[in-house]
Structures are given as C-alpha cells and as structure tokens.
Image: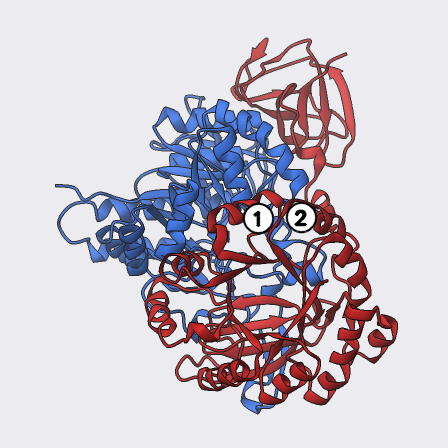
Amino acid sequence: MSNIVTYIQSESDLELLKRLRIDLAILAMRPFARDGISFDEGLKLIRLATASGTSISLEMDKIYTQNEFEIFKDDLKKLSFEMIASLRVADLGVAKYIMEFYPFVKLELWTEAIGSNVTALIEHERYFGRHLSTLILSLQLSKSQLANFCTNISTDKELLVLGRIPIFYSPRHLLTGRSDADWMEVAMASSEETPHSGFSVVENKNGTLMYNPKDIFLVDKLSELMLMGVERFRLDLRHLKFDELEKLLPKVVSSVKDGGDSDCLKKEYPRKVISGYYNANKSDVLFAKLKNPNLIRDDSIYIGYVVSSLKGKYLAIVVDGEYSLKIGEQVKFVTPEGKTVKLAIGTLYLADGNNVLTVAEGVCFTGHIKGISAKSTVSIQRF
Amino acid sequence: MSKELPELLAPAGCLERLKIAISYGADAVYLGGQKFGLRSAAENFTFKEIEQGVTFAHKSSRKVYVVLNSFLHDNELAELPEFLRAIENIGVDAVICSDPGVVKTVKEFTKLEIHLSTQASCNNAFSARFWKDLGVARVILGRECSILEAAKIKEQAQIDVEIFVHGSMCIAYSGNCIISNFTAGRDSNRGGCAQSCRFEYAIKSHSEAFSKNSFFLSSKDLLGIDHIESIIKNKISSVKIEGRMKSALYLGTVVKTYRAALDSCASDCEANQEMLLCLKKELYKVTHREYCDGNLVKVAGPDSVSADRESEEMNYGMVGVVIDTTSKDTFLIEVRGVFKRGDLLEVIPFVGEPILVGSDQAVGPFGEEIVKFSPSSLVKLPKVAGIEKLNIVRIKL
C-alpha cells in the first residue's frame, strides 16, 4: 500500500493530518528549506507532532555554498534528531555530511537534478547505502521512465502527485534586494513573452523561488503508480488556504485508499492543473529544429565549405584539410536550405589567380555555380 | 620567480573558434559533440572536427575537454559508451559531466579524466568530496561560490577547482531552473534552455514598491578581470570563460585579454594596475550585458541584476576573420559584418596592440571594386606586418 505524505505549516495542518490518519508529515523550515516557515515555528511544530505521534520528515533542500555550509553545521546542532524521522536533502554535500556525522539519520534524496536515469539513482543507492531511505523522484519522468525506475530501484520512491511545481531557485533576492533578516515576500509574475502567466514568486532569506502557474495533478494516475511500485505520494498544497486544504485532503486520501473519484477532485481543485510529463516527455524533440541539419558535415566525405559566392565570377571555398579538392573531381554542394548540386570541378585557382590542380587546405576558387551560396558544404560525391 | 597560473579555459562553439581560442592564448578549450551537451543550438563538433581540434590544440600542448553535461535519459545513456570510446581514441583530455550516471559510464568504459559540470551545483567541500569519491578529478564550482570559498573547497576536498571568470550567468543555481521545461516544452537541462530569465515580467505584489515591470530574473554578465590576482593567489586551478554560442570577436578578445591579465600577474611583483585597467577596457568592446563581479568576492546583491532588456552594449562590431595570408603582398578577410571602403579597421593580433588598417585599398579577391562589404564576401587588403591567419578584425561603431 502506498503512503501519502504532505506538508504541515501550522497546528491546524497537524490536526487535519491526525484526523486523516496520516502519520508522516513534511516540515519545511528555514534555514534548511528553500521555502518554509520560520525556525522557531518549525521547532514548535516538531515538538507538537512528536507529542501527537506524527513523524516528521524535515525538508533540507537548500543548496549550500562553502560559507553557508559552515553555518549549516551549527544550525544542525540545534535539531533534536530523536524527533525527526528523516531528512529530505537536495545538496549532495549535505547528504555526505549527514551520512558521516549523523549516521543514525535516514536520508531522503531529492533527485530532480541528479536522477534522470536509472544508473544515476543506482549510484546514489550504492553510495549512501543503508542511510538512504527514499529517493524523491523527478517530476519530469514519463510513466514509462517511472516504470523502468521502479523495476530497477529497490529504495522507496516518492513522487509529487498533487500541488505546486517548483521551477526556479536562485540564491539572489530578486524581488526586494534584501538579504538581511528573516522575511518572506510573495508576488505574481507574468510575461508577454510566454503564453503562461501568474508565476508565483517567493523570496526569503534563502533566495528566490518560482512556481509553475499550473499545479501537477496525478491523482487520477494513482492506481497506475501504485502498480508500478511508487511507494509514497507527496502532496504540496502549502499555497492553498486551510479551508481548501480541509476540503481536499480527505478526498485525496480516499483516492489513495479506496480509489475515490479523481475527476470530481480535479473539478473541485482551486487551481488549474496539468499532468506534466507523465504521459510522455518530449521536451527534447524540438532540439533537432534548433539546428540546421544541412550545415552538419558528413565526416566521411567532407571537403570544406563555400565562404563566398560572387555571381558570374567565382565560388570561394575553404578546404578543410582532410580531403583535397581536385580538378575533375565529382563533388556535391549542399546549401543551408538543403539544395544539392552535383558536378565535376572544372577550374581551380588560388587568391593570387594562379591555376592549380589540387588544393590540400585553405582558400581556393572555382567558377560560380548558380544557386550555391555561402556556407554551403562541399563534399566528395560518392556513387 | 613566476607564480603558478590557473589554466585559462575557453569555449569552442565550432572548429574555427577552437583554433581562435587556442591562438589567442587559451590553455584549454571545452566543446560539445553532436550529442550529450547542453547547447543543442550550437554548431558543435563532429568526431572528425573533434579530432582536428585535438590535433590543433595538442600541437601547442593545449587541452580539449568535451562536455557531456546534459541530464541524460536511459536511452541516451545506452548510446554513450560508443561516443566515449570514439573521443577517447581521438585523445581528448577530459570530459565534463553533471550526472552520476554519466560519471559511472565514463569510469566504466574509459580512462578519461572527469570534470564535474557547474550544472551539478557543487558549491561546498563535502559535495566536492562526494563527486571525488565517484571518480571526478576536478569540480567546476557553481557561480555562487566566491574565490575564497573555491580555495577552501580545493584545500578541504583536495580536488582541482574551476571557476567561471567571464560571461553570461544563470541566475538560478545551475540545474535548478526548469522554467523552459514547463513553459516552452524544452528541457533546459538537456540542451533546450529558452532563456526565460531574459524575459520582461510584470510583477504584482501586495507591496507597491515591488509591483513593476522588470527583468528581475536577468543577471548581469560576469567580469572577473579585477580579481585575477586574487584568483592566482588562492591557487584556483582553472578559470573559465562562458560562451560556446558567442562570436569569434567575443572569443578572441576575451581570451586574449584574460591571457594578458594572467601573464601580467605571473611575476612576483604586483600586477601593473594601469595595464589591467587598459585590458579591462578591451572587455567593454565586445557584446555584453552590463557587467558585475557576481559572487567572486561577495554575495551578489541587487546590483547584479539587469534593469533593462537590451543592456547588451556594443561599441565595436565584427568585420571578419583573416582567412588567408599566403600571398606575398595581400591578405584575405572573410567578411562577417558590414563595412564600407575607407573605414578604419582594427586587426587583433594574437599578442600585442590592435593593428590599425585603413580600408581605402580594400577590393574583392581579384581586384573587384567594392564600396560596401557585406557578410559572406571576401576582401583583399595590402599586407601589414604582424597579421596572421585567424586574426579577428573589428571596427569601431
């Protein structure tokens, strides 16, 4: 049976979780979490959770520079680890430090940026060994990738199935420019240069974060995910009001436990939703269009490229050096637009005007060829 | 006695720019193959071009690193060993990776040296030690690290450290921005960054003060030349110039300038401040956004973000590249930017002051009378001492 895990930010959240019999909660508090409640509020909630029997997984997803790491080590000493079930770590330096100096603490590793293939995750399993309790999977994995991961990874796996999608994390204070005391500033950002609008921006002492305007909704995929073997489903509903959360959370729990009506839940969800990359990740299909394939040379036949073309006068060719350009040789010109001209080289001369039979490397000239422009490739024409 | 200098590492977006970078003084270059890198739109290198680049670099004892810093999916990882064997056979000096799966594959199939890409956001000594344990020989630190922090990481983790010293900057922790992924369907960590951070945003906040139209995600460019002495003093292993997509003019100018700055600090005596100031002015002659020194000395503040969209300043333009000097009396330029006959051109030699060349006698390669030269044409000029093949030619705008 898969489990649900969600964030608590207040006593009310904690009580709601108790009512729903969710016995593991994520607590995100500064300075350890990129985005979270204050340290004092966090400590208070940890104590309350412990007293009420709720386990706490402490978010520790901040990335640390060397100087910040020194402070982090001191901050860590302020925690009572008997009240914390696990640490959710994104910085591999933090993970290594915890493993070495707090070997009794369970690690849950964020893999959004370090887990796009099975081999990477197996490396993390091997390295952190028994200290690693959960791999927090990337939200950019398609269902086929997830299935593959689940087949090959024995460590528990967690996936965000409902809630906000973090898309940007900078250490700079981009809204206020402040970097002094502990504070939080929230704003909405929209740009005419993208069809998406309403990016939620949060700035605090740890820097600036941005969230996708639409939330992830994979609640309708839970049975599929359970079958695959995802052990834990995460909800991040920290941006919702408590009354919204109070209405939603029981329905999500019902979806997990009893296969509740996810369509109804989707309709009631207060924000627009997407399924992200779940069905397919085609975020690299456009790459081929970023580059002109006609300009990529074929190493096995490449002679050089046309550097200049003067109508009725000449084509200037830079011979690359691997293959010579010779009088009488059958060559193929391919323009940047893809037009191909095949012919035998009739004349060949150098910049001083002297005719030559062959050019091994450098600039040379031949007669102008209609339709062949600068940047065209010149290759050996093989039959 | 000379001080030990860091390696000067330059981008090579194509074979020509590799040669330009090496010729202007780079100790090493980094380039991408047709796969596995983060610049899908760049020309990138075929295997033969990598081989030619390696041959060119090794002739003068310079190094070539190949980037494999895309976050690879399993199907791509399966294709990696063949690519790795090919580049190892060619003789590349190291690969730049950001993914533990890639690192493991490189270790398993080759003996190639591994550098950790800045994409991995390695910013502290424990993180560096993690990667060292996996087999990484050098970490390219996140641009969030200062020079002093880099020195501490080097000392504590006993690993070579590389820092960026010049060029465009991600404003996010590298590898931690997926705006493109969710808004443009292009994976920024797999080569498709849509540069969403350069957009103008309308910000609405409860506070009037922060509600405005702003390029609030757009970082100024990094300019590290003022801190060269500190970099040397702190024994940073390598300093890196950003810009595989940038022009030959940018590359030649920036590499030459940092080469001269490093060399001027090599002797035991204090660097010549006047000379450094002079060199710095050169960096203002290439296309750039407003400059800042990022986090090199202190944590980047609000003045590290651009206020305007087109803050790129351009006071010199590219005219072209010298492509032929074999003739006794003339040399040929491949024109890449418009100029008129009569304009005063500046040829940038590999070492030394720019050479001023009048273009009154500029003609086509066979003496054709041309008044205005356009890109993709050739211009012939009377020979001037000191001008070599691959010299960059610019013009004051």
The amino acid sitting under disc 1 is: Leu
The quadrant where residue A157 appears: bottom right
Residue B383: x and y, percent? 40, 30
Horizontally, residue A179 falls left or right of residue A244, namely: left
Q: Secondary structure at mark 1?
A: helix
The quadrant where residue A182 appears: bottom left
In-front residue for pair A100/A273: A100
Query: Which residue: 71% across, 30% down?
Result: A311
- The reply to whether label 2 and label 1 mark residues of one chain is yes
Query: Which residue: 48% across, 86% down?
Result: A44
Work out whether residue A355 can be spotted.
no
Disc 1 marks which residue? A121
Number of callouts in the render?
Answer: 2
Residue A374: x and y, percent? 66, 33
Query: Which residue: 83% across, 80% down?
Result: A268
Q: Would you place residue A145 above or below residue A9 in this image?
A: above
Say the numbered circle drawn on residue A212.
none
The structure's colour scheme is by chain
Which chain is drawn using blue? B
Disc 2 marks which residue? A149
Q: Are marks 2 and 1 in contact (CB under 8 Å)?
A: yes
Image colour assigned to chain A: red
